[in-house]
Amino acid sequence: MSGETRTTCPYCGVGCGLVASRAAAGHLEIKGDPAHPANRGRLCAKGAALAETLGLEGRALYPEINGRRANWAEALDHTADVFRRTIDEYGPNSVAFYVSGQLLTEDYYAANKLMKGFIGSGNIDTNSRLCMASSVAGHKRAFGEDVVPGNYDDLELADLVVITGSNAAWCHPVLYQRMTLREPGAPAPRIVVIDPRRTASCADANLHLAPKPGTDAILFNGLLVHLARTGHIDQDYVAASVAGYEDTLAAAQVSAPDVESVAAACGLDAQEVWQFYEWFARTERTVTLYSQGINQSRTGTDKVNAILNCHLATGRVGKPGMGPFSLTGQPNAMGGREVGGLANQVAAHVDFGDAAGIEAVREFWKAPAMAAAPGLKATEIFEAIGRGEIKALWIMGTNPAVSMPGGDAVRDALAAAEFVAVSDCASDTDSTRFADVLFPALAWGEKDGTVTNSERRISRQRNFLPVPGEARADWWIISEIAARLGFGASFDYRSPAQIFREHAGLTGGTSGPARLFDISDLAEIDDAVYGALNPVQWPLARGAGSQRLLASGEFPTLDGRARMIPIQPAATVTADAKRPLILNTGRLRDQWHTMTRTAKSPRLTAEATEPVIDINPADAGNCALEEGALARIESDQGVLIARVHVTEAQSQGSLFAPIHFSDRFASDARVGSLIVPVCDPISGQPELKQTPVSAIPFDAAWHGFALSREPIEIIGADWWARAQAAGHQHTEFAGNDVPEDWDLWARSILGELHGGGEWLAFGDKGLGLYRFAVLRGGALAACLFIAPDHNLPDRQWLAGLFAESILKPVDRMALLTGAPAEPAGDQGPVVCACQGVRLGTIEAAIADGNTKSVAALSDATGAGATCGGCRAELTQMLKTHRQHLNSAPMEALAESA
Ligand SMILES: Nc1nc2c(c(=O)[nH]1)N[C@H]1C(S)=C(S)[C@@H](COP(=O)(O)OP(=O)(O)OC[C@H]3O[C@@H](n4cnc5c(=O)[nH]c(N)nc54)[C@H](O)[C@@H]3O)O[C@H]1N2
Ligand SMILES: Nc1nc2c(c(=O)[nH]1)N[C@H]1C(S)=C(S)[C@@H](COP(=O)(O)OP(=O)(O)OC[C@H]3O[C@@H](n4cnc5c(=O)[nH]c(N)nc54)[C@H](O)[C@@H]3O)O[C@H]1N2
Ligand code: SF4
Ligand SMILES: [Mo]
C-alpha cells in the first residue's frame, strides 16, 4: 500500500473511522480517523489492535470441496448445481442463505436480491435475528418503519442517559467515551444503568439498578405510570402525534400500579426506582440507550415498545439530546436492515404485506420470481434443516455452530444437511467444519464497500492490503453463483460501486407510503465519488435540511401518528430447585464474538485466556465453588465448563458467561449449547440472556497448564482451553485419568515437540505435584505444571520467563519449585489491553495516594493512555478506593438528587 487509507472499523456498530498506513519501519499502523464524525480520532482496544489480527495464518485462501482444495470453477459449479437441482426438485423454499451483519452492504444487497427476487424464496435470514430483530419489530410497531431516530451527538447533548441492557463501556466503547468524557467545560450527564450485573458501564453511573433478569417491561411500564401521575406527559405532542396513549397507560397501570409494586416485581429498592423515575420525568434531554439485555428476550419486542412508549408520551423522540437509541452490534447490522436482509423484509424498508412496494421492487430488479411470503427466521432455518425440509444452506460471514442457541441441535442439523456452503475468511471455524464447499472470502482491509453504523451513517470500508491467495469478495462469489443459476444479466456486477448505486436507486424508486430510508440521491454517483465518499448520514441532507429523523412529530404510518403499544409483561424465566440459577451471556471487552480474528492478538487475549463465569459470593458458597476452581454449568440442554470468578458485581441468583469460546479455543465452553431456543413470537429473536442452570464443581483428579513457544496437543484431558499469548501458547487442562507415568506423559506432549532440548523435571507422587520444563539454548521453550487441585503456580511470572534469552540459574530452580525466588506478587488480570497494565500495578499506584484522578493514574501507570477503553475500570477503581477511605454509602445518589 502507499500513503494512507481511510476506512471503517470491522467490529462494533459505533463504526469508527480509521486510517491505515505503513509506518517507517514497514509495519502497518491503524489509527483513529480524526475526521470521522463517529469517533473523531478515538479508538478502543479492539480497533487499536487490528494490525495484529491481519496475518494470513488461519485464513481461507482457496476454495475447498469436502475439505480438499479445489479451483473456483469447480467450487462454484458444484454449489450452483446443487442449488439448481434442489430448487428444481423441491422448490425454492428448500434452500436458504444464513448471512451476517458483518457483510458489506453491497454483499448483503446481492445475496438478498438473489434469494428474494431470483430464487424466489424469503429464506434468507441473518445473525441480526439474534441481535436486532426485536428492535426492528419494536420500531415498526411504534414508528411505522424501522428507524433509529438517535444521533451520536445526542449522547453529548443529553442531561440524562439511561443505559439498559447494554454494557456500552465494553461493547460500544467509543460511544461510551463520547458521553462520559465530554469536552472541557461541558457538564457530564447523569447516568442510570439498568443491568442485573454491575458492569464497567456502571463506573460513571449515578444510579445502578440491578433488576431481576427480564423485568424491564415492568420497570418501564411503571415509568409511564409515574410520568402520567406526576404530570409529565407531553399532552400536545400525544394529541398531535401519538395514537394508543390511553390504552397503553391503562395496561401499564395493571402491571405497574405504583413504585412499590414495581420495586417488588423487579427486586429493586423502591427509593431507587423512584429516583430513576423522577430523573426521567424532570429531565427533558434524556436518551435511553439499549441493546441485547432488552432485545435478546422471548418478549424483546414488548420491552422495546415499553421503552419507546415512555419517549413517545414525553415527546422525546428525534430531538437534540433526547430519544430512544437502540445500539446496533455489528459493523453493518444497520446496512443489513437497509437492504432488507431479514427474512420478513423484502428490500429497502419494504415489507411483505406491502403489495405495491413488492411490485415496485420486482419491477426495479426485473425479478423473475419475487418471493411472495416471509421466509424462515434463523432458528427456524436450522429446525427446517433438521427436519430435512431445507436441503441446501449457504452460510456467509457468521459462525452459527457457535453463536446459535440450541447449539447441539444446530450442529446436528448442519451435519445432516444435504449440502452446506460456507463463505468465510477463516479456514477452520466450528461452522466451516460442516462445509461441503468452503468459499474463501476477502477479509477486512482487503474488501471494499460500505457499512452503516448505529446512527445511520454510511461509511466506506476500503481495501489497503493485497488479495491473499485466491480469496474473493463476497459480492463476487454471490454474483458468480447467480450467473450459474441463469441470472447473469441481473448480477453482472463489476464493482461494489455499481451495486451501491443500484441499492441506492431502489430506495427511491419504491411506491406506497413514503419511506424515510431514501438514499436515492446517491444512485448516480460515479466510481470516483463512491471511492472518495465521505461518511454520510441518512436522511440525506438536502440543501439546508437536517439529518434528524422523526423530530417533526410526523411518522411514516398511514395516519402520520406513532403508536404507543399496550404492554402486559410476561412472566420471567424462574429458577427452581433443579436449576437454581439463571445463566446470562454476553461479551468481554477485548474479544469479538467467536474470536476468529481477535484471538490472533495476544494483547486482546490477555483479558481472558480461558472461559470464566462470574458468580455472586452467596451463590458460590451454595454451590461449593471457589475462586479459580472449575465449574460445571448444566442446563436442560447442555453443559459448560469454565473457571470460577467470584464477584459482588454479579447479582445473586444469576451467572454470567462470555459468548466467545468455540471448540477451537476450549472444550465444553460454547454457551449456545446450553440455551433452549425460545423466541419472541413477534420478532423471532431468541432469548439468549436467561437460561435456568445448575452449577457444581467440575471434579477432576488433576489440574494443570502448559506454556509453550509452539502449540501443543493435550492428550488425555477431560477439559482444556487454549490461547495465543505474547510469544507463547497458553494451554489449561484438567482430567480424571491419571497417567501411569507423568514424566512419560509430559515428554509425549513437550519432549518430542521440543526435541533436543534440556529436560527439567520434578515430581512428588504423594502430593500429586509435577513440574516439567524444556530449555533450548538456555531459553525457556515450554513448561508444564500438574497439581491435584486448581492451586497452580503463577502463570504471569512464568509467561515473563519467555522473554529471557537465557534463563538465570535461580529461574531454572524456580521452575521446579513452582514459585519465583523473589515473589513479585500476582499482578492480577490485565486491565489496560493496549499497554498490558495489570490490576496490581494500578492498585499499587492508587494506594500510593498521589493518583487521585484517572488522568494522574494514567500518567503514572500508562493504563488508559492509548485507547482509553479501560477508563471506566480505572474510574471504578478510584471510586471504590475513595469509598473505602470515606466508608461512604455506595452511590452519589444523595449528592446529585
Ligand atoms: N467487546 C465487544 N464488543 C462488541 C461485541 C463483541 O463481541 N465484543 N459485539 C457487538 C455486537 S454484535 C453486539 S449485538 C453488541 C452487544 O452489546 P451489549 O448488548 O451491550 O452486550 P451484551 O454483553 O450482550 O449484553 C448487554 C448487557 O445486558 C445485560 N442483561 C442481561 N439480562 C438483562 C435484563 O434482563 N435486563 C437488563 N436491563 N439487562 C440485562 C447483561 O448483563 C449485559 O451486561 O456488542 C457489540 N460490541
Ligand atoms: N448466548 C448468546 N449467543 C449469542 C449472543 C449472545 O449475546 N448470547 N449474541 C448474538 C449476536 S448479537 C450476534 S451478532 C451473534 C454473532 O455471532 P457470529 O456471527 O456467529 O460471530 P462471528 O464470530 O462474528 O462470526 C463471523 C464469521 O464471519 C467471518 N467473517 C468475518 N468477516 C467476513 C467477511 O467479510 N466475509 C465472510 N464471508 N466472512 C467473514 C469470521 O471469520 C467468522 O467466522 O452471536 C449471537 N449469539
Ligand atoms: S468502538 Fe472500537 S470496536 Fe467499535 S467501531 Fe470503534 S474502534 Fe471499532
Ligand atoms: Mo450482535
Image (cartoon, helix red, strand yellow):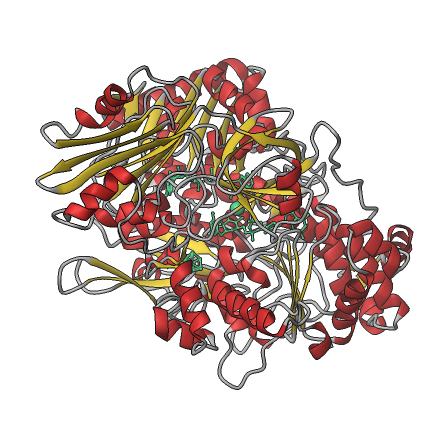
Q: Residue at x 78, y 51 (%)?
A: 266
Horizontal side, residue 412 vs residue 159: left or right: left
Locate residue 362: give its quadrant: top right
x and y, in percent, of residue 798 in the image: 28, 45
Relative to residue 433, is residue 352 depicted above or below?
A: below
In front here: 735 or 277?
735
Q: Nearer the viewer, residue 278 or 157?
A: 278
Q: Eyeballing the image, is 406 above or below 569?
A: above
User: Where does the N terminus fall, quadrant-wise?
Assistant: bottom left
Q: Quadrant of the C terminus?
A: bottom right
Image quadrant assignment for residue 840 = bottom left
Question: Which of 700 and 436 lies nearest the eye of the viewer?
Answer: 700
Choose top left, top right, bottom left or bottom right for residue 705. top left
* Residue 541 screen position, x and y as percent: 52, 71
Return the residue nearer the eye: 410 or 846: 846
Report the side of 893 relative to 849 (left or right): right
Q: Above or below — where is 435 with respect to 478? A: above
Rendered location of residue 176, percent (x, y) = 52, 65
* Residue at 42 percent of width and 76 percent of height: 855
Furthest-front residue in view?
Answer: 766
